[in-house]
Image (cartoon, helix red, strand yellow):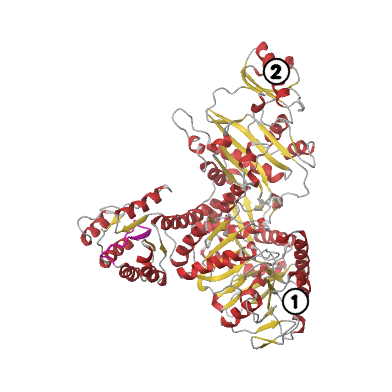
């Protein structure tokens, strides 16, 4: 259903309140009072079976009795009567409804069935629903307060969405105290229909919204959520507080990976991948929100601290150090300027201690110098009240000095009632206020985290130096031969064979069912060997005494075989024992790492990397990532861990081939992409010796599933199925495929091939070069939202991109807009036609209805191409541009 119906919630031309009342203490009365007293100017129509007039307005018994059109219905009646009211709304053509009533799935199976019935009826008529079990919504710009809250939010540029109505009222109260305004204020409730993904898309496309705050208890439709968040976080910050740090996903599992990949850790990884700032308390949410709502985001993390007390400055510097950051280094010029205006005994360092007797003028002088200093990105002003200091006068001086000057500035005026008036002055002027330096620093670092996330999202991933090859057929046979509805672990031999099919460097492993056979295999391996118990019922072999190392000679190997079998029988008398595995001994490895995967119930398969060995859970050094992964994302995963630093070399430890490590992670991610049957993978240890990696042990769990790839993922992977080769008019063969993040250099080279006229036709303005953020936007796409096909000529090092065509879908996928560019020397050879036809075919496959494109009137080649394909051409009202438009339902190529 179209997310654009959401505008009816915030700008309805008429509102019906079902359950409207004048009874004191009722929700129906509170909603009517908020709507009428809030100043909303459009018709508000009460619906109540018992009264003819409510709030001096004519009341109707039913929605169906209202003759005029209704855009929004606010419903506050017992939920068991809801299906009939929703049916009336559908018949009436209402497009939006807020169900305030509780009693849905939160009360059990009966409520869940009721919600399903409501949703089925609503979908029949395209009715969008917020709720049930919600506080309502407010849109201060329009004076719309469709809630039963006690106050109307202040107007601002920050949107707030919460699953909890109680959190909404708490946030509202604090926001009024701190003078923080909101563009949209939404209580999402049980999210029977409209969810976080819908709202993020809608708010992300609203130019009035500069940032988005979310209070989340659970996420429905995670793929839609991730797609929306990844798109919007590139252009405006999303700050999220996730409640319920459940340990359910971290309960003891059958492998190290399962035990360590807990539910909350996966949420953390998903939020980082989406560019979301995650906070952990309501206090942190507001600390971060206040800074975002009132000040420009800092350019970087170079912070200057201006304080009238040494202790306050030290506290702020200590808080910074917890994030691995020191205060900004002051330049000689800045030091000289400060010397000229400050007393001789000022700290002559950062923190800038301007002494306890600092009057407002001294604060203003110091701030003015710091604001103009190029080495400073942001300013924290600390005031501890002194007998000679009027805090409100200092606040007034700060307001005046920062007026019309763009820098991120925030304050920590400590002292409770002694600084209350100063806080009022600062809040009223849009300057964030905090009670302690630590709170201020924490908020600042969250904003720096957003800037860092944004930079990471725009970083161009490097290519691997060779193509990755996978034996998918071999892997598929191994999995199919071991499928079980309830799930089962592969043997170590099958596990390693499966990993080897995807190019992972496993240690060769053979099965011995007797001591004599173990001796024979050891002779073939020509060196010391490792013996391990081979049983599907014993996962942690070391715990069972099922591993013996560095064995040489027939007698030692026979004795080890018997000892392992006896230990295993004692450990689990019921276990099925198939013998032992024999593999070459890798002596004195430099490091042990863990590489694994687990299927999360919310986010699908996740990859884990960290410190390996038998103490891996105790050490707890691990990082989690979501497939698909490229070299850049794999590198970030490694760098998040402590062992990642050791892999680069340390003292007598040789540096590891980092590209090989990245490649291993990418190969593992691809295995998870291709086979949704995989529930868990545990490669522990992966031994690092002389800079190379060896998978010494592996366990893989598989189970049958009805979900085909790639629908088991929350991030759409590269759609390899759209690759094809085509011969163009010149007789040359080109390769048409989807664009990849690693294509940025090729895309930049294509841009350089374009003449000034071609650039103007594509971008409608003169552009000399593509900045990094534009390269990232064009090449790092969400394959669920965009179709971007490129034409490639040549192979390997001679590969060149000669054309690109894309269709960017609106969030509901109904309509998309195309754009195209072809290198000048390749124009007129049918490349543009081939690319656009390919894109249109994919759009039809995805059930997109309409595709349009805006073309300059003198771009005759593009107009002719569009006409030949079947686009209708019309003028764009108010400009000389032309619009190409095609209905894909009627399109017959």
Q: Is residue 289 above or below residue 208?
A: above
Where the C terminus falls, by quadrant? Answer: bottom right
Location of residue 202 in the rendering, given as x and y in whole percent from the top left corner: 61, 67
Q: Residue at x 57, y 74 (%)?
A: 139
- Is residue 122 rendered magenta in the image? no
Q: Position of residue 569 (x, y in %)?
A: 73, 23
Q: CA distance from mark 1 to mark 2?
A: 75 Å
Q: Which residue is mark 2?
A: 561
Check disc 1 and report the residue beneath it: 89
Q: Nearer the viewer, residue 57 or 157?
A: 57
Question: Going 69% across and 32% down the picture, which residue do you hit?
Answer: 539
Q: Main secondary structure of the magenta part?
A: loop
- Whole-percent x, y for residue 336 in the image: 23, 57
Q: Nearer the viewer, residue 166 or 686?
A: 166
Q: Is residue 706 left or right of residue 589?
A: right
Contact between marks 1 and 2 (CB within 8 A): the answer is: no
| Earlier-in-chain disc, 1 versus 2 | 1
Which quadrant of the structure image shows residue 820?
bottom right
Over which residues does the magenta segment extend? 373-389
Q: Within the magenta stretch, is there residue 377? A: yes
Determine whether 614 is above or below 408 in the image: above
Q: Is residue 765 visible?
A: no
Q: Quadrant of residue 230?
A: bottom right
């Amino acid at each position: 259903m179209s997310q654009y119906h959401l505008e009816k919630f915030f700008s309805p031309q008429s509102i019906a309140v079902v359950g409207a009342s004048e009874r004191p203490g009722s929700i129906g009365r509170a909603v009517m009072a908020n709507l009428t007293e809030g100043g909303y100017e459009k018709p508000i129509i009460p619906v109540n079976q018992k009264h003819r007039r409510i709030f001096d307005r004519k009341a109707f018994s039913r929605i169906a009795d209202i003759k005029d059109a209704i855009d929004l219905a606010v419903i506050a009646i017992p939920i068991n009567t809801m299906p009939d009211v929703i049916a009336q709304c559908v018949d009436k053509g209402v497009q939006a409804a807020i169900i305030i009533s509780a009693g849905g799935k939160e009360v059990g199976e009966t409520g869940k069935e009721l919600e399903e019935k409501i949703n089925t009826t609503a979908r029949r008529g395209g009715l969008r629903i917020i709720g049930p079990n919600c506080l309502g919504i407010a849109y201060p710009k329009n004076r719309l307060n469709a809630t039963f809250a006690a106050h109307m939010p202040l107007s601002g540029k920050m949107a707030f969405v919460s699953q909890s109505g109680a959190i909404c009222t708490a946030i509202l109260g604090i926001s009024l105290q701190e003078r923080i305004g909101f563009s949209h204020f939404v209580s999402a409730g049980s999210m029977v229909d409209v969810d976080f993904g819908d709202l993020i898309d809608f708010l992300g496309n609203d130019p009035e919204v500069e940032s988005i705050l979310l209070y989340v208890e659970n996420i429905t439709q995670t793929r839609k959520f991730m797609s929306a968040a990844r798109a919007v976080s590139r252009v405006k910050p999303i700050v999220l507080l996730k409640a319920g740090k459940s340990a359910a996903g971290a309960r003891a599992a059958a492998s190290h990976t399962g035990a360590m990949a807990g539910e909350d850790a996966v949420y953390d990884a998903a939020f980082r991948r989406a560019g979301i700032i995650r906070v952990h308390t309501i206090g942190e949410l507001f600390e971060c929100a206040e800074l975002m709502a009132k000040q420009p985001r800092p350019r970087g993390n170079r912070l200057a601290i201006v304080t009238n007390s040494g202790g306050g400055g030290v506290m702020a510097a200590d808080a910074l150090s917890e994030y691995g950051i020191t205060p900004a280094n002051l330049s000689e010029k800045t030091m000289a300027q400060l010397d000229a205006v400050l007393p001789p005994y000022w700290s002559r360092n950062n923190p800038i201690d301007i002494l306890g007797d600092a009057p407002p003028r001294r604060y203003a002088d110091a701030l003015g110098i710091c604001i103009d200093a190029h080495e400073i990105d942001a300013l924290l002003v600390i005031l501890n009240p002194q007998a000679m200091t009027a805090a409100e006068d200092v606040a007034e001086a700060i307001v005046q000095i920062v007026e019309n000057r763009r820098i991120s500035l925030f304050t920590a005026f400590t002292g409770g009632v002694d600084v209350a008036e100063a806080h009022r002055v600062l809040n009223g002027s849009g300057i964030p206020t905090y009670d302690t330096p630590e709170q201020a620093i924490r908020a600042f670092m969250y904003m720096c985290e957003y800037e860092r996330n944004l930079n990471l999202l725009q970083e161009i991933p490097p290519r691997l130096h060779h193509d990755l090859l996978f034996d998918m057929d071999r892997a598929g046979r191994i999995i199919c031969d071991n499928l079980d509805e309830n799930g089962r672990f592969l043997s170590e031999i099958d596990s390693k064979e499966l990993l080897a099919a995807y190019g992972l460097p496993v240690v060769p492993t053979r099965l011995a069912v007797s001591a004599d056979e173990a001796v024979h295999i050891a002779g073939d391996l020509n060196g010391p060997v490792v013996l391990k118990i081979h049983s599907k019922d014993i996962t942690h072999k070391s715990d069972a005494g099922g591993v013996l190392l560095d064995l040489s000679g027939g007698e030692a190997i026979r004795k080890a075989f018997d000892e392992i079998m006896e230990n295993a029988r004692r450990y689990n008398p019921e276990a099925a024992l198939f013998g032992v595995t024999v593999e070459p001994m890798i002596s004195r490895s430099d490091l042990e790492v863990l590489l694994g995967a687990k299927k999360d119930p919310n986010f699908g398969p996740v990859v884990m990397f960290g410190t390996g060995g038998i103490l891996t859970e105790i050490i707890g050094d691990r990082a989690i990532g979501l497939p698909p992964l490229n070299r850049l994302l794999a590198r970030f995963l490694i760098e998040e861990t402590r062992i990642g630093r050791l892999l680069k070399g340390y003292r007598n430890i040789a540096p590891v081939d980092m590209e090989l490590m990245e490649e291993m992670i990418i190969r593992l991610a691809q295995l998870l992409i291709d086979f949704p049957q995989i529930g868990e993978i545990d490669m522990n240890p992966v031994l690092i010796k002389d800079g190379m990696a060896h998978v010494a042990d592996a366990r893989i769990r598989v189970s049958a599933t009805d979900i085909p790839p790639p629908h088991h993922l929350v991030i759409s992977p590269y759609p390899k199925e759209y690759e094809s080769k085509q011969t163009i008019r010149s007789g040359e063969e080109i390769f048409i495929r989807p664009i990849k993040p690693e294509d940025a250099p090729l895309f930049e080279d294509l841009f350089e091939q374009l003449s000034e006229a071609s650039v103007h036709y594509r971008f409608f303005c003169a552009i000399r070069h593509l900045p990094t953020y534009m390269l990232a936007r064009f090449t790092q796409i969400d394959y669920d939202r965009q179709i971007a096909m490129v034409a490639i000529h040549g192979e390997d090092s001679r590969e060149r991109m000669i054309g690109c065509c894309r269709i960017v879908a609106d969030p509901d996928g109904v309509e998309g807009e195309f754009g195209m560019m072809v290198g000048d020397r390749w124009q007129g050879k049918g490349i543009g036609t081939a690319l656009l036809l390919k894109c249109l075919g994919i759009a039809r496959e995805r059930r997109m209805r309409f595709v349009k494109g805006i073309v300059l009137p003198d771009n005759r080649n593009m107009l002719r191409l569009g006409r030949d394909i079947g686009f209708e051409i019309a003028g764009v009202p108010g400009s000389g541009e032309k619009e190409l438009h095609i209905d894909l339902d009627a399109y017959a190529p």
